Amino acid sequence: MSASRAGRASTAQRAWQSAKVRYSCLLILVLLLITLGAGWLSPYPYDEIDAAATFSAPGQRYLIGADALGRDVLSRTLHGGRMSLVVGLLATLVAVLVGVPLGALAGYLGGRIDWLISRVVDLLLPFPVILLAIITKMLLGDGLVSVVLALSLVLTPFFARMARAKALSVAQLPFIEAAQGSGLGTGRIMWLHVLPHCFQPVLIMATLSVAFAILAEASLSFLGLGLPPPAPSWGGDLQASMSAFQLAPWTVLAPGCAITFAVLAFNFLGDGLRDVFDVGERFL
Amino acid sequence: MNTKQAVLVVDDLAVDIRGAAVLGGVSLAIHQGEALGLVGESGCGKSMTALAILGLLPRGAQMRSDSSIRLQGAELVGASEQALCKVRGGAVGLIFQEPGACLDPVMRVGRQIGEALQLHRGLRGAAQQAVLRDLLVEVGLNDTDRVARAYPHELSGGMQQRAMIAMALAGEPVLLIADEPTTALDARIASQILDLLDRLRRDRGLALLLISHDLAVIGGRCDRVLVMYAGRAVESAPATQVFDAARHPYTTALIAASPGLAGVTPKSPLRDIPGQLPAPGGGRDGCAFAERCTLARSSCGHRVPAWTPVAAEHAVRCLQYEEGWSC
């Protein structure tokens, strides 16, 4: 009874049965609410300088302390999450929307188109994210767009490769030939019969890639390749407070812990989904 | 000859894969309401013929330019991909061997048939659902709502094949090509499916190209039989004559190797055909069957036999008739 039920349960229902998926979803939801609601939740504006409160310890006035300029660490950490999550989600979204159709097309059509797309992907693959971030910052200037672009350039090849591998195997299956035999064109076959088969591995990879992108964004901000100060970001705040670590550990711990939680949440979700879908390591 | 209009005329169809001939000199004609059986052992080019008719040759395969495939008078060789897409699933319905693998496992059956209805007849929404129900009933799937909502794995093999047939009928075809439609099914279901194809042919006046390796499947259901060997048609005859008066040595050997056909009693051992199907493009000059033929003479290795009429509507490619051996 329960077995036949599980067999009939939809993909979403099966995923929700996993504790790992449930808890990580909850954590991500909390993160999203906190960062999106940072404007209301923060006790102070993130850039309000209080010269008298430099490095003040956690207490009644500043809940988890203040930084070198006397700015509230809590307010900055809440606001900093915006940048991390927006960049992480946006970069992954762009990479999925560009990489998956390109890869699936290459795998399904094969031949010269496959060669062309695969070479472009191979060309992108060895570029380090830092170099790409410098280039995009040079070309587009400071801003969200250049960071997102750099990260999606790094992520796209992975999605393209995975979708290509999946499409290659799907294209051999008889129902593709049957679809051709019933008169469907390449576009319809891609949309109806190839892309849906990429959904599960793409979903898992996308979740894991959000975690990667959050970490990468923090690294870029740490190196000064993110938004310029005083814009709050976890990586940037970490860098700014690093020299004061012994004097005021809260200034480092707050953004550091935030990064850890965000990355863990998305990693857990990806792991959980992988267990549920049983996709294996082949595509990831 | 049949006075009705020929639905499909294939003339001298030849296909090469990287220079090696895999099909050569395949000619056939099917008239409205007529069933043509295409028979031969695995690898002899039956499926390739079906795919070639629809322009679905595998990558690397090339049709020779003097081949001709006319569907209701319109030439398909050299037709644009767009025109061919209209023909596939439109005027020509295609049914494959493994219904379970030919339906997309992640799409509901009703949606898959609905896509074909939308593509070929522009039907959407309620009109599409109504036609879909009619189609499912026509192929014997009376529990229409459940079947339409089901995923392929939730249906039995026989039901899957019925759904495939419904999909093939979606474009209101004039010709149905069934490539080994019953090979993956057990005997009882197989005969039900063949009965269904028979009924559809009569009710709709369809032309049917039934492909099988099994003479017993072809035997009772077809008007004419075309026997293929190594990419060539070797004997073309009315179905009744094939079993009673087969002329080509390959056909007689095939009949002797088939259980349950006339002349083979349950007790008598089946005779297999010694040797193997030659690899395509082996640089042969003569009759491809010569190596395995008990009657072969030295001339068989030098010349490809031409079609030789041996009776009314019965022709054979074999030198013993062409050269008039006395045997």
Image (cartoon, coloured by chain):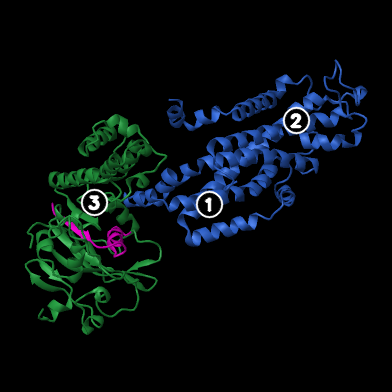
- The CA distance from mark 1 to mark 2 is 35 Å
Image quarter of the N terminus of chain A = top left
Front: mark 3 or 2: 2
Is residue A260 in view? yes
**Label 1: chain?**
A
In green, which chain?
A: B
Front: mark 1 or 2: 1
Q: Which residue is mark 2?
A: A258
Residue type highlighted by circle 1: Ala
Q: SS of the residue at dot 1?
A: helix
- The CA distance from mark 3 to mark 1 is 35 Å
Query: Answer yes or no: do the residues labelled 3 and 1 have beta carbons within 8 Å?
Result: no
Q: Which residue is mark 1?
A: A165
Horizontal side of A59 relative to A142 (left or right) equals right
**Position of residue A283 measured from the top left corner of the image (x, y, whole percent):** 57, 47
Task: Please give the range of residues in magenta.
Answer: B33-55
Give a yes or no on whether discs 3 and 2 share a subunit: no
Horizontal side of B249 relative to A157 (left or right) equals left
Residue A56, relative to residue B278: is it above or below? above
